[in-house]
């Protein structure tokens, strides 16, 4: 039977295998992220949100520093083999962190070191993983596959933190890290099984991408000013709003005097909104530029409601709205960029896009943590509202002054 249009990429058996394995791995990722944040703010510091901000900074800053290498690697190296190496390295780092916690010798600098190591590996993994989708599915199914990938990731975010909150209370953070190690097994199996003969367009991509270095990705983007504007708006929003581990941990311990279970619940509530956003984008065709420049308004409104929410339950509900709006923005932007880029440059362009998002998150994390410690967690969320408003002004100005007149002249 034909699948509904929202799930049409699942008709590809290789994609079904990939998404199923990635879903289990993503649950493990959110188990580790939740345990790591709680370990820092609850056990290793005196409820210091700035320390969580440093962890986020170290985990995401390699996306910027290693950009010249990671984008080239995603286009030039066999992506399947590259992902095998990165997944093995991530599992090893999770095992190291879990071991030192279980041995009761963990210190804050250990978490910092593991976060930096994970950031370095993720800098290679993320662009290769995003570009790998176009190796598994046909080009016409890429927008749907990207949205379903994101839905899988955020479905795991719905489950992972909730499980982590319970397991931290029962087992402690060390065993949660060890459980994450096990969740890498299905994805490693899938990558072994997906041989080169099952992948679409891989040889063509590698051959064409070898003709130019990593700077070609920047030159390619420079010729498409719409992509530059979108990356600027995403950077402004992700630098503050996407630092939810920082302000959610601060809200949990300082404002609501909560525990690990409540922290996990807030992340899960945000995941519910993210899943809804992924479903919306999966059911749509390629997003338009006009639609994209309006989305920061939804993010700003959601952040404002979140900052003003008087009770824990209302705050949790507003997290769903924030997850919905941010997911619509990020998936739609990445889909627009990926489909606007020729396949030979897709790895490098996606590396730049991911570095923009992750790098801005890294740079904003210490600021968000400092604002939360000095002025209160609600003010750190309010800062996200202001950044989204600024992003809305930039996108709208470009759309009215440059984009619309250019389209009108082309139509004439």
Image (cartoon, helix red, strand yellow):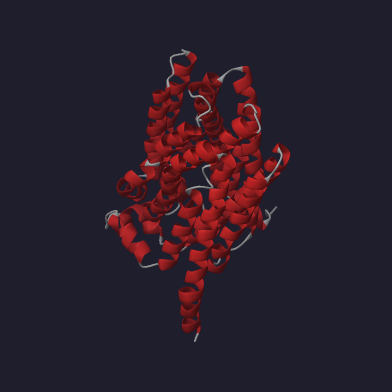
Most foreground residue, 378 or 282: 378
Does residue 324 show up?
Answer: no
Most foreground residue, 253 or 31: 253
Residue at image point 68% right, 55% down = 2
Image location (x, y in percent) of residue 276: 66, 50
Q: Is residue 383 above or below residue 410?
A: above
Image location (x, y in percent) of residue 139: 50, 59
Residue at image point 45% right, 50% down = 357
Does residue 214 show up?
Answer: yes
Most foreground residue, 193 or 10: 10
Q: Residue furthest top?
A: 103
The image quarter containing residue 125 is top left
Q: Is residue 382 above or below residue 118?
A: below
Image location (x, y in percent) of residue 200: 45, 52
Image location (x, y in percent) of residue 329: 56, 56
Name the side, left or right, on which 397 lies relative to 204.
right
């Amino acid at each position: 039977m034909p699948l509904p249009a929202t799930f049409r990429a699942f008709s590809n058996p290789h994609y079904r295998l990939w998404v199923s394995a990635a879903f289990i791995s993503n649950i493990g990722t959110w188990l580790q992220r939740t345990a790591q944040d709680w370990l820092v703010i609850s056990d290793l510091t005196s409820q210091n949100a700035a320390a969580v901000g440093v962890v986020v900074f170290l985990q995401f800053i390699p996306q910027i520093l290693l950009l010249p290498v990671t984008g080239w690697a995603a286009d030039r190296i066999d992506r399947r083999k590259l992902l095998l190496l990165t997944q093995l390295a991530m599992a090893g780092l999770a095992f190291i962190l879990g071991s030192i916690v279980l041995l009761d010798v963990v210190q804050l600098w250990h978490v910092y070191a593991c976060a930096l190591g994970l950031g370095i590996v993720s800098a290679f993994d993320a662009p290769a993983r995003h570009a790998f989708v176009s190796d598994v599915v046909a080009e016409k199914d890429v927008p749907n596959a990207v949205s379903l990938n994101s839905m899988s990731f955020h479905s795991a975010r719905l489950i992972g933190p909730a499980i982590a909150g319970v397991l931290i209370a029962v087992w402690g953070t060390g065993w949660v890290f060890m459980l994450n190690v096990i969740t890498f097994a299905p994805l490693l199996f899938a990558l072994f099984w997906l041989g080169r003969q099952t992948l679409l367009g891989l040889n063509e991509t590698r051959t064409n991408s070898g003709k130019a270095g990593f700077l070609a990705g920047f030159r390619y983007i420079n010729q498409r000013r719409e992509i530059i504007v979108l990356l600027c708006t995403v950077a402004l929003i992700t630098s503050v709003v996407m630092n939810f581990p920082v302000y959610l941990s601060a809200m949990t311990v300082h404002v609501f005097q909560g525990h690990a279970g409540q922290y996990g619940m807030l992340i899960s509530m945000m995941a519910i909104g993210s899943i809804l956003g992924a479903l919306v984008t999966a059911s749509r065709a390629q997003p338009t530029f006009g639609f994209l420049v309006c989305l920061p308004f939804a993010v700003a409104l959601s952040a404002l409601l979140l900052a003003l929410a008087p009770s824990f339950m209302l705050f949790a509900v507003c997290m769903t709205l924030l997850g919905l709006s941010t997911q619509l923005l990020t998936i739609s932007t990445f889909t627009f960029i990926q489909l606007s880029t020729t396949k030979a440059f897709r790895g490098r362009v996606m590396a730049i896009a991911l570095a923009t998002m992750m790098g801005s998150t890294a740079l904003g994390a210490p600021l968000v943590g400092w604002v939360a410690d000095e002025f209160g967690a609600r003010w750190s969320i309010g800062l996200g509202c202001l950044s989204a408003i600024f992003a809305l002004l930039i996108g709208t100005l470009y759309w009215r002054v440059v984009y619309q007149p250019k389209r009108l002249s082309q139509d004439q």
